[in-house]
Amino acid sequence: MQNSMYQQDSQPVVEQDEISLRELLEALWQGKLIIVIIAIAALLLGIGYSFFMADDVYESTAVVMTTPLDLSIDSESESGFIDYLAQYPTLTTETYLYQVKDPAVLRATIQSLELKRDDGTYWPVNQLANIVDASNVEKTNLIAITVRHGDPKLATDIANEISTQFTAFISNNSRRQGMQTADIILEQLAAEEANMQEKSSELTDYLQEFGSIDLLKNEVSALVSQITGITTRLNTLEAEIEADTASLTSLLAAQSTDAQIDLGEYSVILDRTQSSDERIRQLQLNLNSGELTTAMLQLELVDVQTRLLANLTTRDALTAQQKTLNTKQQDLQIRLNEEEYRYNALQREFDLSRQAYSAYQSMYQQALQTAAADIGATSIIVASEAIVPVNPVAPNRMLNIAIAVVLGVMLGVFVTLFVAYWKKSKPTATVGAGGKA
């Protein structure tokens, strides 16, 4: 039941839609004359505007080839401030592209070409900027400088002049940056020279007061060599003392008290200038064989005792001398360490100051060279000069006429439908207070 009612209700709606569409088409057909008239009028307006009202616009393009440029100065110093002074902005193609329309470039172009308005005043920079466009040719380092103007010759002149002024602008910028950097470096150079002289004076005063550090090193080295010699001698003496002590023990064990001979009777043993062999030969002449053996043992015992006593005395003297020298060497070594530290500190400060001064000198020379060089002429090359265009790029007459016709047709359709609607619409009766129409 509900479905049938829905179908009954929906059918009139479909018929009403079909009638409305038919009426729409009939209205358009009946108003075709209006549509055609308005379209023809729009066509005539488009033709009139394109051929008689719109000014011709010519486009001229100059192409320049750029070279990315890094003007940073080489610095061998480890100082961060010096490295900072050595930094220059890197000129990339994007940087060049932005600077083409720099006010300074445009102002110089206006002055050079004497671009003036009707009242005799020079063009404002914005007026020139509005007709200039700079673009990067895709995947190249080429920049196209395009000028659009009603005068083809003037458009060409402006494009070529901008490329010339742009080259000069880059050179002037690099020259100005070089001079600014050179002035800053020159101030630092003077300050570093004064600092280097101060460090040199401190080092000279130290050397005059304490002398060369090498002399103190040589003195310590001589003491070390002397102590080493004494140590070697003591080691030899210790070996001799040990050997003599062992020999003395053996001799004392081998000799009996009863068998000893009073050698005082023999003057040969009192003569210490003779060798042991000579004394033994003399004893052989004065003693029999039994007494000779005893005398020889006793003589050897005296020699060992004498040598042992001499070695012990020498060892004690060398030990005392070694102790004295060790103390002196330690004191000198401490003094050497202190003086060497002071000397190295002064020398290091002087060397750093000298390195910084040399770095500033090198940077100053490079900055002057950068300021003197014509960077623009080497980094900006006019790859293609602008030529006078023959055909205008605007207005696009055919496009303007087509747009006028389309707009005329649309306006005609709107007017036709509006008139049809106005004719068929009826005023709605107003219901009064009593509820009657």
Image (spheres, rainbow, N blue to C red):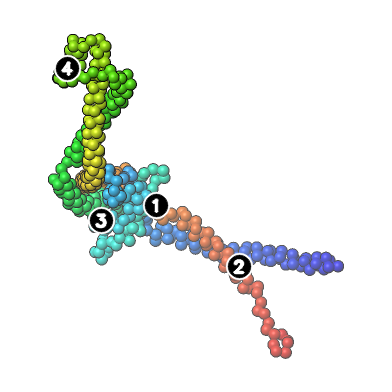
> Which of the pair 62/42 is nearer the observer?
62
Is 191 positioned to the left or the right of 437 in the image? left
Is 101 positioned to the left or the right of 202 in the image? right
Determine which residue is flagged by label 3.
108
Label 2 to label 4: alpha-carbon separation: 170 Å
> Helix, strand or loop at disc 2?
helix
Q: Residue 417 carries which label?
A: 2
Q: Earlier in the sequence, mark 2 or mark 3?
A: 3
Tell me the quarter of the image containing the N terminus.
bottom right
Q: Residue 266 carries which label?
A: 4
> Helix, strand or loop at disc 3?
helix
Q: Which mark is residue 393?
A: 1
Residue 254, placed above or below residue 86: above
- Residue type indicated by callout 3: Ala
Label 4 to label 1: alpha-carbon separation: 145 Å
- Where residue 71 sits: x, y (%)? 29, 46
Marks 2, 1: nearer the viewer: 1
Is 9 positioned to the left or the right of 385 in the image? right
> Helix, strand or loop at disc 4?
loop
> Which of the pair 235/56 is nearer the observer?
235
Q: Which of marks 1 and 3 is nearer the N terminus?
A: 3
- Residue type indicated by callout 1: Val
Q: Which of marks 3 and 4 is nearer the N terminus?
A: 3
Label 1 to label 3: alpha-carbon separation: 27 Å
Instruction: Judge the density around disc 1: few (<14), some (14-19), many (≥20) Cα neighbours within 10 Å.
Output: some
